[in-house]
Image: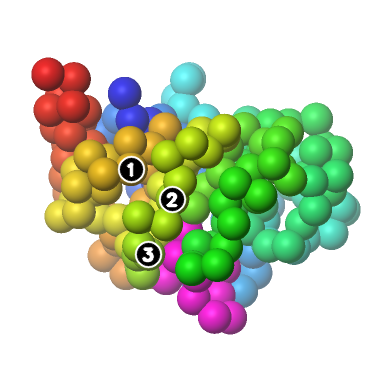
Amino acid sequence: MTRIKICGITRVEDALAAARSGADALGLVFYAKSPRHVSVQQAVQLAAVVPPFVTVVGLFVNPSEGEVREALRHVPLDLLQFHGEEDPEFCAQFARPYLKAVRVKPGVDLLQCAARYAGAQGLLLDAYIEGTHGGTGASFDWALIPRNLPLPVVLSGGLHAGNVAQAIRQVRPYAVDVSSGVEAAKGIKDAAKIAAFINEVKRADVQLSR
């Protein structure tokens, strides 16, 4: 069964809509340059409405140790997601499981990345767009993902209800991650798009299980 993460949650109603539709995880962005950025205070309010068994993920881009610890002090984050150039030792120091995001383009050795971040819970694979750290709505060539990656793959980058079933059939990821593909505007989710996305994931899973 393909797990589903809805990232870039900024509103209580969006968190609730994602959880009700069957999302396994919700992503909160602690990166000030992102249009989906939330403050620690906002994150506290969002995390408070997340029902049991839905994972709360904190996304960071090249943070200081203090920034991560400040978020952890106030927000019950289950999982950390690092999108910058953080080294494995930095990622592993917070007594939380973590995902390491890798921006994929030709020449990026994903097997080497998996070996370097062997302590990660998985690799989140996103599109490489110069000067950005995700949330672009751009996809990448899924054929660049080796079949024998030793870590679970969280597939991100340009996914939406129209292509996620094909992505699951081709890549067979552990999980899919969507942000802009279920939005009405940047940072504002669309409940109908969330429901359609999750339905497509479940449909693909059923087809693969036959």
| Mark with earlier residue (2, 3) | 3
Residue receiving disc 2: 145
Q: Which amino acid, mark 2?
A: Ile
Q: CA distance from mark 3 to mark 1?
A: 12 Å
Asked whether 5 or 89 is in front, the reply is: 89
Q: Is residue 24 above or below residue 86?
A: above
Asked if the residue under mark 1 is in contact with the one under mark 2, i.e. CB atoms within 8 Å, the reply is yes
**Left-right relation of 162 to 79:** left
| Front residue (pair 42, 3) | 3
Residue 133 in the figure: left or right of residue 89: left
**Is disc 2 placed on a helix, strand or loop?**
loop
Report, in whole angstroms, how far the alpha carbon at label 2 lies from the one at label 3.
Answer: 10 Å
Q: Quadrant of residue 115?
A: top right
In the rendering, which numbered label is found on residue 171? 1
Given residues 170 and 185, the one toward you in this image is 170
Say which amino acid is labelled 1.
Answer: Val
